[in-house]
Image: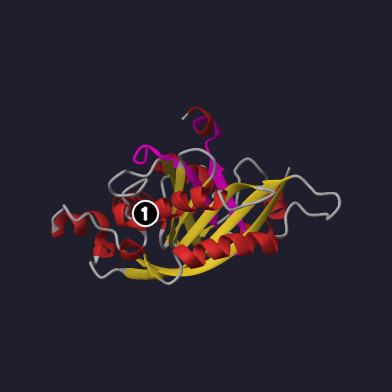
Amino acid sequence: MLYISRRIDFSAMHRYRVDSWTEEKNRQVFGPCSNRNGHGHDYKLEVMVKGKLNNHTGMVVNTGDIKLAVGNLIDKELDGKFLNEEHPYFKQNIPTAENIVAYLWEAISQVLENCSLNRLKLYENHYLFSEKEEGDMVTFTRRYHFSSAHRLHSDQLSDKENERIFGKCNNPYGHGHNYYLDVAVKGIPDNITGMVINMADLDEIVEKIVLEEFDHKHLNLDTAVFKGLNPTSEVMAKVVYDMLKPYIPKLYRIGVWETEKNYFEYINEEETVHG
């Protein structure tokens, strides 16, 4: 089986709002997204399809055909639209990133030929995106930023081994990064809010449990959680997962961007299979 990805961009407006709720409750649950007049985004949609190789053409499917089929659907239904006001589905269902990607999964599946849909990833902006694969579940990812210093050093190794393995990163005084943290939850979007998790609640939990602990800190010296641990980004991904899991039952994945070039990810495979 081969997998092909094509990106389609579009712009649209939306609002998060339940008309039967009070203004206060809408504001509490949806924050500024509850503005009656709406707001907009430049969306990026990554469409990944799968299929078998056509030995005559050397392709599974022409990516131009994917662009044409999906692009026509997007142009007709979403691009340049106020979704709550102009799209029949989103007049009844709040156009959260989770609901949009779930709707697009069904719609795009019907227009593809000679291949089948494998995954959709919809970016609302740099700090928020949703993913959909087969099944009812949707993954919602929120991205956070913090700045920290660390020194890569293992007490299980000699000083020479530490210097050889970690090089400049073993500098006794440490060094620093602008980290980005991806926190992904997975579940079925709520019938009313259209969200897998209340974004305001997620922001509050991550801020209190992780960002306040790590931001503008030396991980080796200022944090209890890394005491006795070598704060590599691999270790950080697992540590953050363990910190957040008691507060976020639907937690699925933690991603750590140490730099733009270096990304590390932790998924609890056992919970993925049995959860």
Please tell me whether mark 1 sits on a helix, a strand or a loop. helix
Instruction: State left or right for residue 60 relative to residue 111.
Output: right
Type of the residue with mark 1: Tyr
- Label 1 neighbour load within 10 Å: few <14, some 14-19, many 20+: some
Q: Position of residue 82 (x, y in %)?
A: 35, 68
Q: Which of 193 and 275 is in front in this view?
A: 193
Instruction: State left or right for residue 230 relative to residue 97.
Output: right
User: Looking at the image, which residue is at 15% across and 60% down?
Assistant: 23
Q: Where is residue 34 in the image (x, y as percent from the top left)?
A: 25, 62
User: Looking at the image, which residue is at 48% across and 66% down?
Assistant: 76
User: Magenta segment: does it hold 60?
Assistant: no
| Residue 145 in sight here | yes
- Please give the range of residues in magenta: 245-271
Q: Quadrant of residue 217?
A: bottom left
Q: Position of residue 239 (x, y in %)?
A: 48, 43
With respect to residue 125, does 132 lie above or below? Answer: above
User: Looking at the image, which residue is at 60% across and 63% down?
Assistant: 7
User: Magenta segment: does it hold 267?
Assistant: yes
Q: Which of 1 and 247 is in front in this view?
A: 1
Residue annotated with mark 1:
89
Q: Which of 164 and 140 is in front in this view?
A: 140
Q: Where is residue 47 in the image (x, y as percent from the top left)?
A: 59, 56
